[in-house]
Image (spheres, rainbow, N blue to C red):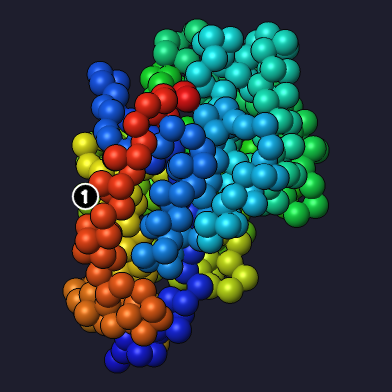
Amino acid sequence: MTTFESISSQLEAQAIELPSWAFGNSGTRFKVFTTPGTPRSVEEKITDAAKVNELTGLAPKVALHIPWDKGDDYAALSAFASEHGVALGTINSNTFQDDAYKFGSLTHTDASVRQMAIDHHFECIDVMNATGSQDLKIWLADGTNYPGQGDIRGRQDRLADSLAQIYARLGDDQRLVLEYKFFEPAFYHTDVPDWGTSYAQVSALGDKAMVCLDTGHHAPGTNIEFIVAQLLRLGKLGSFDFNSRFYADDDLIVGAADPFQLFRILYEVIRGGGYGPGSPVAFMLDQCHNVEDKIPGQIRSVLNVQEMTARALLVDGDALSAAQEAGDVLGANGIMMDAFYTDVRPDLAAWRESRGLPADPMKAYAASGYQQKIADERVGGAQMSWGA
């Protein structure tokens, strides 16, 4: 029987990047809601992210989105982050909010539009050079809404050429991670709809190109943990975007809809060598907090990942292997369920306290007065939001 004491040391190095955009205003296609205390600058986003890390010890990096987080001095921004106890992480590109990209960006038939998108990624690599970031993450809205609207194969050829130009610009210690999404905003087909397409494209580029898996970017019923196992087996799982979905790309707090799925995914991450020292996988949240406060929403999210990681580490691997080899269907399933149903929250609270962290970060944040402080201080100016 695996105990919490035997796995606690494996929780030490857990790190989950926070997305800068999670601290800005967001909403649905129908409404973006404003809230008191919302950051008006990238620096204020970083300050809020640092508060999450201060209380949880789980979020030492902040991912940036260009041009949403565009600035004049990224070295100074990196120093600002360091002063607040965090570092700048993944740089996310944006080729979905410019009028020129109406019919595609890296896949566009117009060479000048493709070059515009490629140049944007070159700019993102320049940002990486200034911040010391490892990963350039690419998510494309490119696709079509109607049969015949575009040449599906031709778009793949143009994508491969565009990605090759971006890849060639990477530094020795930098990576390109290509995200996929099976629909939205394009509805007939997206140019990178699934892990297979992303894998095919990045495999052609080289060792510094990896697949990014967003847990909300799959068709209903998709076995995400199988995809995790396969990509780890192939050595091409580069990063995770954690969120939760009831219907589509809901971008809700990770684990909110299906904690058991999060547990199963993390078990495969651990089993496949994607967790721990030397792991090639970067873990990040990709969520929007539309009706809840942003900072506690991020705190709740990283704690959910930590809890399910602890439960997944509790799976008795030796006993599970023996049951699988013996064809003991119910015994094997029972071993998984025993770990999933183990309440690790009291152990995690004690573990946090032993490391100088609050036993309950959510209560500690509520008692800190920080939410009221930023609401009182951040008056005037333009609140940051999607596209700003």
Residue 292 pos. (x, y %): 22, 42
Residue at the image point whose x is 49% and y is 47% from the top: 46
The quadrant the N terminus occupies is bottom left
As drawn, 114 above or below 248: above
As drawn, 356 above or below 177: below
Residue 110 pos. (x, y %): 68, 8
- Name the residue that disc number 1 marks: 257
Please give left or right for residue 248 compared with residue 183 in the image: left
Residue at the image point whose x is 45% and y is 55% from the top: 50
As drawn, 189 above or below 179: above
Q: Amino acid at mark 1?
A: Ala
357 vs 206, nearest the viewer? 357
Please give left or right for residue 224 compared with residue 244 in the image: right
In terms of image quadrants, where is residue 307? bottom left
Residue 308 pos. (x, y %): 31, 67
370 vs 294, nearest the viewer? 370
70 vs 196, nearest the viewer? 70
Residue at the image point whose x is 25% and y is 46% from the top: 372
